């Protein structure tokens, strides 16, 4: 579900080094320049590094005339971080410095509610004070006079004042790994996943052309263009229900999700909702549910089973379309001599896309977030552009 109050979300986990995608409804992507770069980070996975005169510029501004909440995670080699909130007039500003641990990822939140500004550092409120007039500028800085040297990630901007509970929930986000089938969370059926195999294991190669020459050792194998077999995913699951009859009903309801024609969308969200793992799968094998019947009908019942799924087209590029109204369009333009299949994330698909600067559009009848899968020989795509967010440039 789209949070309409979230007007900017820059997680800085993008494959393109010149752009940072905005995952909010605004789609105000940031342009990177100078010494602003996306880097690998041990804490965040990937983050924005700003040194010297580097910039990440977005068209979305802080709504100073209304309530707002600005959230970000930041890391600096220094012992303090300063912030300044400026208002019109002579010396109409608030400047404060916060002590931090060098090279430690810190959570910061700035909440304006009416004329009161509240600042959070991790789980603590470190400042509360009144604002004089309507602010017109905000800045964060470290104590390096020679130039900034910070790493930040997951910048969120809301056009409302989040409650203390909401702020702390953002700070303490340690979600379980979530699994979805065709948009439905496994937990809605009482199903939990205890172990997953094959989600991002290395794929087995398909057999290639090889030649055995007489009077030579070994064989000559074609190694220029590796191609891969289908992906096999095994989910070790358990399902629980409040009674024997409910158990049977819930098992049947869950397995029925795989009965429809065509592929089914499996989605795994390991941590960041902006970087899900998505697959077009089928359930081809039977499923044996191991269970022990409760003594009475109202006893809690638990069963375990293995779900063996197959992804026929395992090499893909993954995009996201964010539609805030009905009938928004996603567009993909591609140059490829090989056929590509596009799965639009709403249950529809476009097969056999190829050609030079071939443009394919898709209209979404309902608003929402849709993950688009493009399958085929992704490595051989010669040119590619889209109005959607590129989540995974290559996932296999």
Image (cartoon, grey):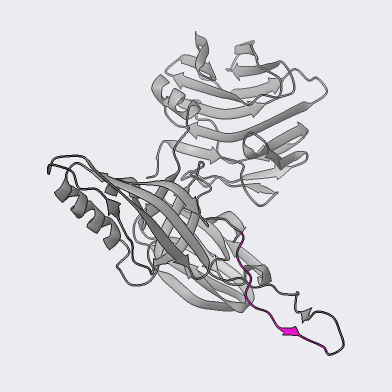
Q: Quadrant of the N terminus?
A: top left
Q: Is residue 11 above or below residue 225?
A: above
Q: Main secondary structure of the magenta part?
A: loop
User: In percent of the image, x 49 and y 15: which residue is there?
Assistant: 118
Q: Is residue 23 above or below residue 262?
A: above
- The residue closer to the viewer here, 81 or 182, is 182
Q: Which residues are magenta?
A: 202-213
The image quadrant of residue 95 is top right
Q: Quadrant of the C terminus?
A: bottom right
User: In percent of the image, x 71 and y 41: which residue is there?
Assistant: 39
User: In percent of the image, x 46 and y 32: which residue is there?
Assistant: 158
Q: Is residue 115 magenta?
A: no
Q: Is residue 255 above or below residue 263?
A: above
- The residue closer to the viewer here, 236 or 386, is 236
Q: Is residue 147 left or right of residue 193?
A: right
User: In percent of the image, x 42 and y 18: which residue is there?
Assistant: 114
Residue situated furthest left in the rendering: 297
Q: Is residue 207 magenta?
A: yes
Q: Is residue 15 left or right of residue 193?
A: right
Residue 169 location (% of width, % of height): 43, 27
Residue 304 location (% of width, % of height): 33, 50
Q: Is residue 387 visible?
A: no
Q: Total number of numbered labels?
A: 0
Q: Is residue 293 left or right of residue 393?
A: left
Residue 335 location (% of width, % of height): 64, 73
Residue 338 location (% of width, % of height): 61, 78
């Amino acid at each position: 579900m789209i949070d309409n109050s979230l007007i900017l979300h820059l997680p800085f986990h993008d494959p393109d080094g010149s752009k940072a995608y905005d995952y909010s409804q605004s789609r105000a992507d940031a342009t990177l320049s100078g010494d602003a770069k996306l880097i690998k980070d041990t804490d965040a996975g990937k983050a924005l590094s700003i040194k010297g005169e580097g910039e990440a510029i977005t068209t979305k501004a802080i709504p100073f005339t209304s309530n707002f909440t600005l959230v970000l995670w930041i890391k600096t080699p220094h012992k303090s971080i300063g912030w300044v909130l400026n208002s019109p007039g002579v010396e109409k500003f608030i400047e404060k410095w916060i002590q931090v641990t060098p090279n430690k990822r810190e959570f910061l939140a700035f909440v304006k509610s009416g004329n009161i500004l509240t600042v959070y550092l991790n789980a603590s409120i470190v400042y509360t004070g009144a604002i004089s007039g309507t602010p017109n500028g905000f800045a964060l800085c470290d104590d390096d006079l020679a130039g900034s040297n910070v790493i930040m990630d997951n910048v969120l901007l809301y056009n409302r004042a989040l409650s203390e509970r909401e702020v702390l929930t953002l700070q303490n986000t340690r979600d379980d790994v979530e699994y979805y089938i065709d948009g439905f969370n496994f937990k809605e059926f009482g199903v939990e996943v205890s172990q997953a195999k094959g989600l991002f294991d290395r794929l087995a190669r398909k057999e290639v052309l090889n030649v055995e020459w007489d009077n030579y050792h070994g064989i000559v194998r074609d190694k220029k263009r590796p191609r891969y077999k289908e992906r096999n995913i095994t989910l070790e699951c358990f399902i629980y229900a409040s009674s024997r009859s409910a158990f049977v009903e819930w098992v049947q309801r869950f397995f029925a999700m795989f009965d429809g024609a065509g592929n089914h969308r499996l989605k795994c969200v390991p941590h960041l909702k902006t970087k899900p793992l998505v697959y077009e799968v089928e359930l081809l094998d039977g499923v044996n549910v191991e269970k022990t019947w409760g003594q009475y009908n109202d006893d809690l019942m638990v069963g375990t089973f293995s779900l063996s799924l197959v992804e026929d087209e395992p090499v893909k590029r993954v995009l996201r379309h964010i539609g805030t109204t009905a009938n928004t369009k996603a567009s993909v333009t591609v140059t490829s001599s090989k056929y590509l299949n596009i799965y639009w994330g709403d249950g529809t698909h476009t097969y056999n896309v190829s050609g030079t600067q071939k443009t394919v559009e898709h209209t979404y009848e309902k608003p929402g977030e849709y993950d688009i899968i493009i399958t085929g020989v992704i490595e051989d795509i010669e040119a590619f552009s889209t109005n959607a967010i590129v989540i995974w440039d290559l996932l296999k």
